[in-house]
Image (cartoon, rainbow, N blue to C red):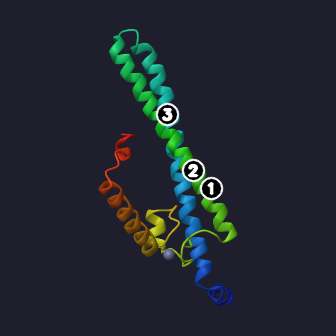
């Protein structure tokens, strides 16, 4: 056995955390890329299918097909936004700015990052923040603001 293992161990936990996080982000990126590509293909296939079907379908049904395509498109758009977020996260990881809490600077748990890759706060800080926001909302509703329902 060579002593390369010792050298790796000497790099410490942050080194393995880095590669662990990088692998997680890379995996997620691949997953989403594959999904987006699959969807694009699906939309195109359905599109040619739909072209023939539309000759027999009535106006209502073809409108429904349009809505379906719009939904697919929105989904693809959402996925590509996620992709750019992952790219940002990877860039931040390279700079050593990824995975640390925005508020207290502590490392965000790997489990949490796995569930929420774009989390910017550790669990504790996020909870504190959510509680504060909730209190804020309660105060706002007690004041009787109808503005809360404006964009529903
Ligand atoms: Zn924190």
Disc 3 crowd rating (10 Å Cα; few below 14, some 14-19, many 20+) is: some
| Contact between labelled residues 3 and 1, with CB atoms less than 8 Å apart | no
Secondary structure category for the residue under label 2: helix
Q: Is residue 125 left or right of residue 56?
A: right
Q: Marks 3/2: CA distance?
A: 15 Å
Residue at 52% from the left image edge and 61% from the top image edge: 118
**For residue 16, which numbered disc appears in the image?**
none
- Residue 130 in percent (x, y) is at 40, 65
Sequence-wise first label, 1 or 3 = 3
- Residue 8 in percent (x, y) is at 65, 84
Q: Which residue is mark 2?
A: 83
Q: Which residue is mark 1?
A: 87
- Residue 97 in percent (x, y) is at 64, 70
Secondary structure category for the residue under label 3: helix
Q: Marks 1/3: CA distance?
A: 21 Å
| Contact between labelled residues 2 and 1, with CB atoms less than 8 Å apart | yes
Sequence-wise first label, 3 or 2 = 3
Q: Is residue 86 placed above or below 34 in the rendered structure?
A: below
Q: Quadrant of the C terminus?
A: top left
Q: Quadrant of the N terminus?
A: bottom right
Disc 1 crowd rating (10 Å Cα; few below 14, some 14-19, many 20+) is: some
Q: Marks 1/2: CA distance?
A: 6 Å
State whether label 3 is within 8 Å of ligand 1: no
Residue at 55% from the left image edge and 53% from the top image edge: 30
Q: Is residue 58 placed above or below 50 in the rendered structure?
A: above
Q: Which residue is mark 3?
A: 73
């Amino acid at each position: 056995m060579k002593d390369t293992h010792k050298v790796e161990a000497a790099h410490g936990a942050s080194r393995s955390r880095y590669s662990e996080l990088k692998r997680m982000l890379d995996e997620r990126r691949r997953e989403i890329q594959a999904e987006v590509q699959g969807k694009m293909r699906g939309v195109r296939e359905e599109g040619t299918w739909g072209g023939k079907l539309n000759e027999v379908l009535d106006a209502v049904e073809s409108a429904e097909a349009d809505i379906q395509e719009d939904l697919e498109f929105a989904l693809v758009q959402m996925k590509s936004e996620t992709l750019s977020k992952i790219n940002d996260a990877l860039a931040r990881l390279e700079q050593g700015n990824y995975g640390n809490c925005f508020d207290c600077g502590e490392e965000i748990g790997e489990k949490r990052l796995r569930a929420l890759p774009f989390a910017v706060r550790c669990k504790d800080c996020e909870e504190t923040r959510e509680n504060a926001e909730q209190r804020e909302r309660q105060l706002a509703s007690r004041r009787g603001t109808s503005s809360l329902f404006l964009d529903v």
